[in-house]
């Protein structure tokens, strides 16, 4: 059952973005060389998941991947991390004086348990943002569950005084949950921050998000990016659509999902024991 709230908290910016510290929150995972294929075109890899909040230095480069989540693998190749981790674009914007940047970004685990997200991960991310003196937060999901996760985190941050904007591709999930501000890009899952190998679209997407932070009149404000993925919108019919899959493909995907679920369960239980 997807998270749903009738209302949403809302905090206006307390000072101009140029004088604010922006936190970046991602559901992408640090590359783990010992955890199998996580590169371009990789199949779903549950072994590469992470189960606790992590943080990284925003002044450094990071190799974050999204092979651990259910993105649209048919229409995006996972070649350009700028489409799911907009730290380089944020650093450029900070260098130009458009926005300040907090000294850390934070990784949010994508638990299917809303209770765990609300009781464990949301307070932890809030504590880290407060420690970093973050004045606002940009949240970037990838898969369907990622969109729910960051929506819950955005609500928690906002309820505790930190303005937020979610940029994503799953409009139904985010709006069903109810967030303060949402920039919707009608792209395949895994491209929340812009088109791959298109720096201009990534800069434009970030600027739209910053403007939304500055101008949203109240909660549940959604803005749709004018960018299009392609001239042909037929790609929208492919994601998780059994009518477009053969019986063999459905069987293969079911086996892949079951294996991934079992691997994730084993990793999760081993971490609880440890």
Image: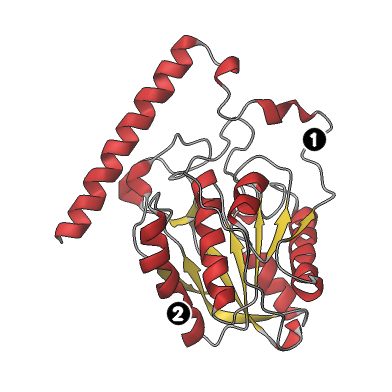
> Is the residue under label 1 in contact with that under label 2 (CB below 8 Å)?
no
Q: Nearer the viewer, mark 2 or mark 1?
A: 2
- Residue placed under numbered mark 1 in the picture: 230
Occupied quadrant, residue 76: top right
Q: CA distance from mark 2 to mark 1?
A: 39 Å
- Along the viewing direction, whichever of 109 and 113 lies nearer the viewer: 113
Give the x, y percent position of residue 240.
55, 28
256 to 143, vertically: above or below: above
- Residue placed under numbered mark 2 in the picture: 128
240 to 117, vertically: above or below: above
255 to 86, vertically: above or below: above
Question: Pointer 2: residues within 10 angstroms few (<14), some, or many (20+)?
Answer: some
Give the x, y percent position of residue 125.
45, 73
Occupied quadrant, residue 37: top left
* Residue lying at 80% horizontally and 72% vertically, measured from the top left: 217
56 to 191, vertically: above or below: below
């Amino acid at each position: 059952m997807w998270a749903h709230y009738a209302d949403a908290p809302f905090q206006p910016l307390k000072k101009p973005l140029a004088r604010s510290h922006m936190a970046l929150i991602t559901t992408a995972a640090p590359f783990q060389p010992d955890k199998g294929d996580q590169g371009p075109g990789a199949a779903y890899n549950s072994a590469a998941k992470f189960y606790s909040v992590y943080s990284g230095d925003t002044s450094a480069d990071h190799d974050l991947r999204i092979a651990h989540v259910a993105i649209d693998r048919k229409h995006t190749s996972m070649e350009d991390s700028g489409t799911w981790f907009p730290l380089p674009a944020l650093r450029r914007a900070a260098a130009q004086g458009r926005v300040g940047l907090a000294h850390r970004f934070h990784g949010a685990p994508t638990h299917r348990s809303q209770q765990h997200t609300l009781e464990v991960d949301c307070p932890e991310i809030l504590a880290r943002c407060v420690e970093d003196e973050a004045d606002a937060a940009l949240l970037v999901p990838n898969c369907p569950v990622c969109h729910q996760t960051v929506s819950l985190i955005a609500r928690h941050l906002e309820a505790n005084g930190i303005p937020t904007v979610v940029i994503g591709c799953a409009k139904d999930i985010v709006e069903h949950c109810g967030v303060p501000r949402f920039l919707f890009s009608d792209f395949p899952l895994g491209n929340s921050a812009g088109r791959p190998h298109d720096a201009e679209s990534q800069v434009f997407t970030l600027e739209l998000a910053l403007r939304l932070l500055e101008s949203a009149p109240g909660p549940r404000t959604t803005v749709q990016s004018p960018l299009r993925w392609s001239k042909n919108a037929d790609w929208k019919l492919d994601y998780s659509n059994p009518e477009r899959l053969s019986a063999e493909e459905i069987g293969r995907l079911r086996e892949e999902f079951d294996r991934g679920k079992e691997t994730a369960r084993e990793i999760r239980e081993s971490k609880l024991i440890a």
